[in-house]
Image (cartoon, helix red, strand yellow):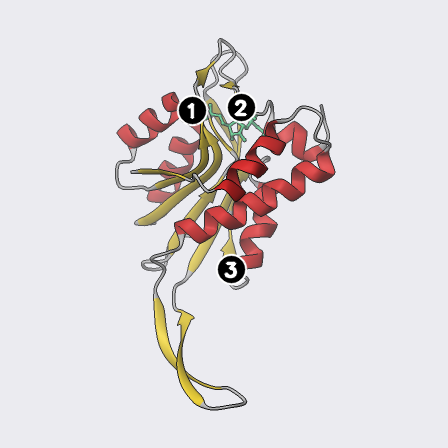
Amino acid sequence: MTTILSHPLVRHRITLLRDRATPPKLFRELVGEITEFLAYEALGDVKTREVDVETPVANTRGARIDERIVLVPILRAGMGMLDAMLHVLPYAKVGVLGMQRDESTAEPVPYYAKVPPAKGDELALVIDPMLATGGSACDAVQQLKKLGYVRIKFLSLIAAPEGIARFERNHPDVPVFSAAKDERLNSHFYIVPGLGDAGDRIFGTL
Ligand code: PRP
Ligand code: URA
């Protein structure tokens, strides 16, 4: 299942993110802010446990997150979302998957993997700004399943209909959360209207 965020605070930021005049510093800040909104949406069902808490005024009951979480950015653009995820989930563990699209076929070429094997039912959150053909996302989730992960969610900033369809076909058990759903892919497998090359815009390598 795919959830697309429609909140005005998100749409405002996505519009600034798309703007070709947005410089890398602002681009990175926007990626972080949108990522926090995505985390808010994606983690609405995170497990909590009831705890006692003593305020300056009275004793009361509260909730603490009671879930082991592993964040998995797909290199390199996924790194742009990592700080924001760690900001809202400071105790999460981090594994990384390196993947580069083949420029002619757009198929992912994995080049690095450092993810802790699953120990139980921890939640893996895969983060990557772009879900274009869906090749990178599908491959990343496949790798996590081989490592024993059974609870996985995928978070992206912009998704193409083609990528969503491929991902849902291959991994119907993995929910997707995206801040925008665009029109289509172009002949170079870039998302239209999209925002261009997310990695280049985050790292200033245009
Ligand atoms: C981009 C993006 C995704 C992938 C999406 O990475 O960050 O990982 O493309 O495309 P797909 O859905 O067609 O697989 P890219 O390969 O450009 O590498 P980079 O992050 O190093 O820039
Ligand atoms: N990767 C990007 O960075 N942008 C796209 O539009 C597609 C893949």
Q: Do the residues labelled 3 and 1 touch (CB within 8 Å)?
A: no
Identify the residue shown where x is 56% and y is 56%. 86
Q: Do the residues labelled 1 and 2 touch (CB within 8 Å)?
A: yes
**Viewport quadrant of the C terminus:** top right
Residue 7 in the image: state x and y as whole percent: 46, 42
Task: Answer yes or no: is residue 115 visible.
Answer: no
**For the residues marked 3 and 1, what is the alpha-carbon distance in whole angstroms?**
27 Å
Residue under numbered circle 2: 194
Residue 120 in the image: state x and y as whole percent: 32, 60
Left or right of 69 on screen, residue 56 = right
> In terms of depth relative to the viewer, which is nearer, 31 or 77?
31
Q: Which SS class for mark 3?
A: loop
**For the residues marked 1 and 2, what is the alpha-carbon distance in whole angstroms?**
9 Å
In the displayed structure, 5 sits above or below 111; it is: below
> Which corner quadrant of the image does residue 174 belong to?
top left
Residue under numbered circle 1: 160
The amino acid beneath tag 3 is Leu
Q: Which SS class for mark 2?
A: loop
